[in-house]
Amino acid sequence: MARGVVDYTDKSLKVYLLKNVAVLGAVLVFSVTLKPYFVAGSVGTVFLAQLGALVVLRIFYSVASYLYRKFVRKPKDVLSYGKWAVVTGSTSGIGEAFCHELASRGMSVLQISRNEEKLKSVAKDVKAKHQGKTIEIRHMVHDFANQNTEYVEKFHSALRGTLETLTENGGVGMLLNCVGVSNSTPGLTHDTPKEDVLQMLAINNNGTTLMMQSVLPFMMKRKSGAVITVSSGSCTHPTPLLSIYSATKAFGNQLTRSMYYEYKEHGIDCLSITPYYFISGMFKMRKATFCAPFPQTLVVQSLPLLGYEAEAYPYVGHALNKLQTYTPTEYPFRLLNRMKNIRARALARAAKKKK
């Protein structure tokens, strides 16, 4: 979500659960009150019984499906896709977590990010923590915000050359589209700074698409590969004051979940994950909560979904958070008020720093 301005805790989820328990209680009380007016076996009684049975079955199915996916279904071995994983945005957050997790499973990693010092630091850290694994760590420097045509073409030409080499050295198995950016402060669409808008479009849309086009041909040759795009929970419903950001994330989500069907026959699995808040450079909190886990948690719970899901909330806390959108009170208006409060606090902090 918004970089450096998020102020989200478990409180909102607890309030949501309490409110819905209250609503459920009210429905039950209402049903009991009406019971005397229904004659046993009447159409009304039968209808309510059938409706209740459907609700119970739906809940049972959801729980059973989750337990099956979590504990029964066998996940795919990431090495079955190929030796190398290409990770964008690999120097922090979920991108860095993917580097560590895939290395722990024996995959070599090609990191792509704009800061070479950070790239080297992450590579050193990954090698140190996974010394028992026979892995290689390479890197390429690229600023996805730079949309100069000559600069972009030069990078992708170099990338294709590197991918040719990796294809001869075990194959390009995975592409992790982790690079992303949000507007610095929630705000109205017309007030969003032009540089923020262009940066979001360049990184979240153009960057993701061009990486797909460069990497996929090498997977097509081998008839094997996997793509994971890190989208956002904000794109799965209206998100006022983050309208542009959520729209750019919807682009990556739609692209990747459509590719799930498009490339299945070519042996390539595609997955879009739509997390809400997690601990990262875009999030000031450093202590994980039920609603905001560490990125490692998201990574570990995302990988078993490859080949089975087109899109998913890999983390159960985020899936529960999504339930708020189905409440009688229209969720976007409640979200708007929350974003207004976040914006006010962010602006107050910025004003305080200037003094």
Image (cartoon, grey):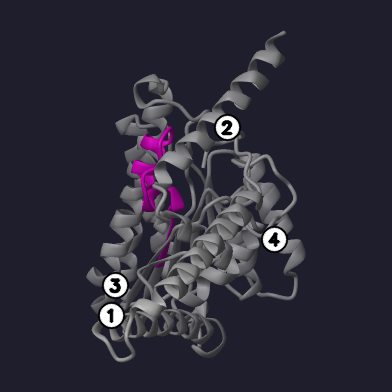
User: What residue did someone put label 3 on?
Assistant: 221
Magenta region includes residue 236: yes
User: What residue did someone put label 2 on?
Assistant: 342
User: What residue did someone put label 4 on?
Assistant: 126
User: What residue did someone put label 1 on?
Assistant: 44
Horizontal and vertical percent position of residue 334: 47, 41
CB under 8 Å between discs 2 and 4: no
Residue at (44, 77) in percent of width and height: 81
Callout 4 crowding tier (Cα within 10 Å): few <14, some 14–19, many ≥20: many
Regarding residue 73, the answer to whether it shows in the image is yes
Q: Amino acid at mark 3?
A: Lys
Badge 2 element: helix
Horizontal and vertical percent position of residue 222: 33, 76
Mark with earlier residue (3, 2): 3
Q: CA distance from mark 2 to mark 1?
A: 47 Å
Badge 4 element: helix
Comparing 326 with 320, the one in front is: 326
**Quarter of image, res 254:** bottom left
Range of residues picked out in magenta: 227-249
